Image (cartoon, rainbow, N blue to C red):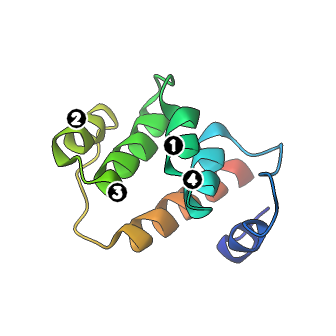
C-alpha cells in the first residue's frame, strides 16, 4: 500500500494488510470505526511514533489531558485541525515512512 487512497480503499476489507506497521494497523482499525481495537494496537508500545497515534486516539475520545500527555511523549503538539485531517496526516506520514 503506497497511497492514502489505497489505504482508504483497504478499509472495505475485513482485516488490515498483514504487512502494515503497528501504527498503520491502529489507524486502519480507527478508520473502520473500532476505537478500542485501534487503541489496543498502540497501548503497550513505547516508541514516539506509537505515542503520536495514541495521542490522536485520546484526542478523538475527547480525553484532552491524556491526549496532551501522549503528544508530549511523541514530541508533538496537539494540532489545530479536524480529527479527519489529523488521521489523514498520520496515515500519510506512516505510509511515507514505510516507503523509505
Residue appearing at x 46%, y 22% in the figure: 46
Query: Label 4: few (<14), some or many (≥20) within 10 Å?
Result: few
Q: Which residue is identified by label 1?
A: 36
Q: Is residue 69 left or right of residue 34?
A: left
Q: Which mark is residue 69?
A: 2
Labelled pair 1, 4 in contact (Cβ < 8 Å): yes
Q: Which residue is identified by label 4?
A: 34
Q: Quadrant of the N terminus?
A: bottom right
Q: Nearer the viewer, residue 50 or 97?
A: 50
Q: Which residue is identified by label 3?
A: 60
SS class of the residue under badge 1?
Answer: helix
The answer to which of marks 1 and 2 sits earlier in the sequence is 1
Q: Is residue 35 above or below residue 85?
A: above
Q: Tell us which disc is closer to us: 3 or 4.
A: 4
Residue appearing at x 64%, y 56% in the figure: 28
Labelled pair 3, 2 in contact (Cβ < 8 Å): no
The answer to which of marks 3 and 2 sits earlier in the sequence is 3
SS class of the residue under badge 4?
Answer: loop
Q: Nearer the viewer, residue 40 or 87?
A: 40
Real-space Cα separation, disc 3 to disc 2, in angstroms: 14 Å
Place of residue 33 in the rendered image (x, y in percent of width and height, measured from the top left): 56, 61
Real-space Cα separation, disc 4 to disc 2, in angstroms: 22 Å
Real-space Cα separation, disc 1 to disc 2, in angstroms: 19 Å
Q: Is residue 27 above or below residue 48?
A: below
SS class of the residue under badge 2?
Answer: helix
The answer to which of marks 1 and 3 sits earlier in the sequence is 1
Tell me the quarter of the picture where residue 81 sits: bottom left
Real-space Cα separation, disc 1 to disc 4, in angstroms: 6 Å
Query: Label 3: few (<14), some or many (≥20) within 10 Å?
Result: some
Amino acid at each position: 500500500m503506497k497511497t492514502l487512497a489505497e489505504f482508504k480503499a483497504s478499509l472495505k476489507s475485513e482485516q488490515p494488510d498483514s504487512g502494515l506497521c503497528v501504527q498503520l494497523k491502529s489507524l486502519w482499525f480507527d478508520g473502520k470505526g473500532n476505537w478500542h481495537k485501534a487503541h489496543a494496537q498502540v497501548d503497550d508500545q513505547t516508541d514516539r511514533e506509537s505515542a503520536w497515534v495514541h495521542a490522536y486516539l485520546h484526542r478523538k475520545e475527547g480525553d484532552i489531558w491524556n491526549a496532551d500527555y501522549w503528544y508530549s511523549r511523541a514530541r508533538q503538539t496537539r494540532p489545530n485541525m479536524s480529527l479527519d485531517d489529523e488521521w489523514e496526516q498520520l496515515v500519510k506520514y506512516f505510509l511515507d515512512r514505510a516507503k523509505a
